[in-house]
Image (spheres, helix red, strand yellow):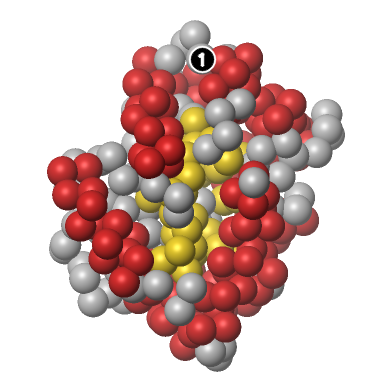
Amino acid sequence: MNLADSHCHLIYKGLGEQQPEVLARAREAGVVAMLNISTREREWDEVIAVAEREADVWASVGIHPHEADEHPDVDAAKLVEKARHPRVVGIGETGLDYYYDHSDRDRQRASFRAHIAACRETQLPLIVHTRDAEADTAEILRDEMGKGAFPGVIHCFTASREFSEIALGLGFYISISGIVTFKNAKDLQDTAAQLPLDRLLIETDAPFLAPVPHRGKTGEPAFVADTCRFLAQLRGEDPEALAEATRANFHRLFSKTLG
Ligand SMILES: [Zn+2]
Ligand SMILES: [Zn+2]
């Protein structure tokens, strides 16, 4: 299997301390591409450093909605400047999280729009986190798309079928995490089974969300193979073919990975 993990956090606690082993296990499982996602400004240089060191790892620059309050000064210009680095292939993760509300909602929305402006300028894809905020996420994406198109992905998709259709309609990709393997994820499984193959990505969001049969463990990119096998069975597809299609989608969306 040749797999891409479209979203992981290789510097986070649980993975950062054993990065060579984590990368070795990922490669053994067939993972040939990993996107190392940042969520705070102080992580930017560190995620980029991993990507400079490892040929199969790329980096993103962004501020997670949880961290929006802490980064009032991160604007589009700052993101654009950092995104010039050759190993930075996406902008995010950004978006709206009204489940935890760790940051003020106005600040979350302002930060989200700043990231979108950076995408429009760089044409790098937007990496969107959205939780309990479908209506506002859809409204902002539509509104901003009206000012000029930009590519993107809804990461760790757990939203409704209706939201998936809106995202697809805007040209977005949808990334499925290990959550799809959970027993209580029936609605997500139904939606994931219907998503068009040419817009699908797979991710671990490691160290979080370890899929079945690894639940309770620290998530790591190698587990993207388990999610791929589960998703293939759900969709009635060959796991190898699904791995190959989602890998190709990853490089089509994050086209800067192609150099
Ligand atoms: Zn997220
Ligand atoms: Zn994440």
Residue 45 location, quadrant: top left
Left or right of 17: which side holds 112?
A: right
Label 1 belongs to which residue?
74
Q: Is residue 203 above or below residue 227?
A: above
Residue at 15%, 43% (x, y): give it: 17
Residue at 16%, 63% (x, y): give it: 216
Residue at 56%, 29% (x, y): give it: 85
Query: In this figure, what is the number of numbered marks?
Result: 1
Instruction: Indicate the amino acid at tag 1.
Output: Val
Which of the pair 133/236 is nearer the observer? 236
Would you say the beta carbon of the disc 1 residue lies within 8 angstroms of ligand 1?
A: no
What is the quadrant of the N terminus in the image?
bottom left
Q: Residues within 10 Å of mark 1 (few under 14, many from 20)?
A: some
Which of the pair 38/255 is nearer the observer? 255
Residue 201 location, quadrant: bottom right
Determine whether the residue tagged by mark 1 lies in a helix, strand or loop: loop
Q: Is residue 215 visible?
A: yes
Left or right of 61: which side holds 24?
A: left
Residue at 42%, 81% (x, y): give it: 229
Which of the pair 190/30 is nearer the observer? 30
Q: Is residue 11 above or below residue 106?
A: below
Position of residue 29 measured from the top left corner of the image (x, y, whole percent): 34, 73
Residue 99 location, quadrant: top left
